[in-house]
Amino acid sequence: MRLGIREIAVLVCLLGPGVACSQSISGAMLGDTCAGCHGTQGAAVNVTIPPLAGMNAEQFVATMLAYRTGKQSGTIMNRVARAYSDEEINAMAEYFASFPTSTSK
Amino acid sequence: MTETNKRDFLKFLAAGTVMSSAVFAPSLAFGQNPAHVVVIGGGTGGATAAKYLKMGDKTIRVTIIETNDVYQRCYGSNEVLTGHSAIEDLSISYDSLRDKYGVDFMFDTVTVVDPNSRQITLETGAKLSYDRLIVSPGISFTWTETDGYSEEIANSVMPHSWKAGEQTLLLKRQIDAMPDDGTMIIVPPPNPYRCPPGPYERASLLAEMFQKEKPQAKILVLDVKDGFAKDQPFMLGWNRLYDFQIPETKMDGMPDDVNIFDAPGMIEWVPGSDGGKVVAVDANAMTVTTQFGDTIHGDVINFIPPQKAAKLAFDMDLTEGNWCPINHLTMESTRHPNIHVIGDSCVADEMPKSGYSANTQAKVVAAQILHLLHDQEPEEPTWSNVCFSRVSSEYGVSVGGIYRLDHETGKIVSTQGSGGVSPLDASHQFNRLEALYQGAWMENFVTDSFG
């Protein structure tokens, strides 16, 4: 059996995603991983953990960068912020800024 | 590899996923009726997936098939053992998913799933068909690996209390009835298992309770493992609060002011390499026997058995070994097309089997299924896990991880240089805050998943 390039590529992919194709992750995909603590779309019901919905994008970025560099001490947020690139932090900032603040809901 | 090439490869990846199931799974473009996504299992994974599917596209039909009409969460059940919470506090209603998001429910039990006709038969005889199926069935136990142990013993004498409900209440009754100078033995399971820090949080919160109510009591943790999730932050807290002697193997990085004790305090932890593995139990004598031949009496024996995917996952032929292999881009089973497996029963590589993991896996599967139903390529996924544990009601420790798809291996990997456990040089205030955040997390997490 002879396989063309496309079949081989598909086969490789069927066997497992065995190729490097690190694409950028959307703001929603990134931001939804935060929701377990900060609430769905950032609208925390218990605000001991700060809500992110409607947060000013510049403030979000500045806070995340401060956590990432260690300039600001959190508890878990320093460990979390170190996972993200500038691009990803910007994408999350835009995502959360697009929602109304929790209190205005 | 150039950016263009990367994108092309992602397309092929997506093409592979779509092509493997295109024959069976009509997309929205082909169908007259709204697509139907069925979710088997209304736990954290299933509930979150249903909610996020409806949030993403309210025109699709989403049906959860679940045996019980009220969910009992496991997280927070250690607080029921100590009396800080009532068993009723663990109950979560499905009203919000039904009324606010329009999720349909069938409170029934699955008997047969036919992946070819995409039809499900339920115990009551009802049948329904799906375009995409999400299976989030949780865990089951292996009862047979320890001499003298069985499901009957677990239900009567040595509760695991690893699924919330009657098991929680049985263990609580035993703890309450334990003599003031009694010994409670906790036997944590081998990896991998649901809620890796759970047995150790249980030991912690019971120690806090015993300090007040039974100060002569002992908690003996007989472990098959030589380490566990957040072990150093836990042990540091135990050292400060419960006179725990930190073993030499766990001293690396500990602060200079740790206490040194001559005798074991309230909590004693025996790792596998020191004979911690329990090989037999005797329910009549209330003893456990370790690999090194020691037979030890316990007034309460909390034996948590080894775990595997839920029985349904085996019945549906979704397992290889004890767990369900999946394509991590889409969470689709590698064994049957159009069936996606999330939560404790799936193989998620570096992600722990936690409610938080199930919650973020659910969001990934919801996003990808919506793409597939709309004939779009799956998007680049990411997942996270955050877990707060209480060493006492005012002393918390945490672990966090941000996960990505490694396209070289197809595995889920932790993002390098990030995540991990609470630092050992954390301040008193830091640990106070982590205990506080645990409570806030509980409320926000339950609402994100079910509300």
Image: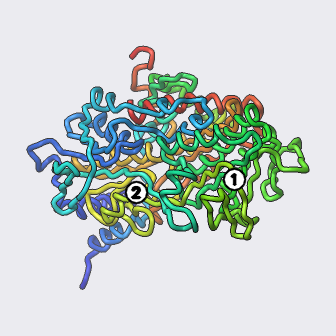
Quadrant of the rendering where the C terminus of chain B is positioned: top left
> Element at badge 1?
loop
| Residue shown at the point (53%, 26%) measured from the top left | A58
Q: Please state which of residues B329 and B436 is positioned toward the viewer in this rendering.
A: B436
User: Please, which colouring scheme is shown?
Assistant: rainbow
Q: Position of residue B240 (x, y in %)?
A: 81, 39
**Residue at 16% across, 53% down:** B26
Residue that numbered label 2 is attached to: B310
| Residue A51 image offset from top left, x and y in percent | 50, 24
Question: Observer-nearest residue: B326 or B190?
Answer: B190
Amino acid type of the residue tagged 2 in the rendering: Ala
Marks 2 and 1 sit apart, C-alpha to C-alpha, by 30 Å
Q: Earlier in the sequence, mark 2 or mark 1?
A: 1
Q: Amino acid at mark 1?
A: Gly
The residue at the far bottom in this view is: A1
Secondary structure beneath label 2: loop
Label 1 environment density (alpha carbons within 10 Å; few <14, some 14–19, many ≥20): many
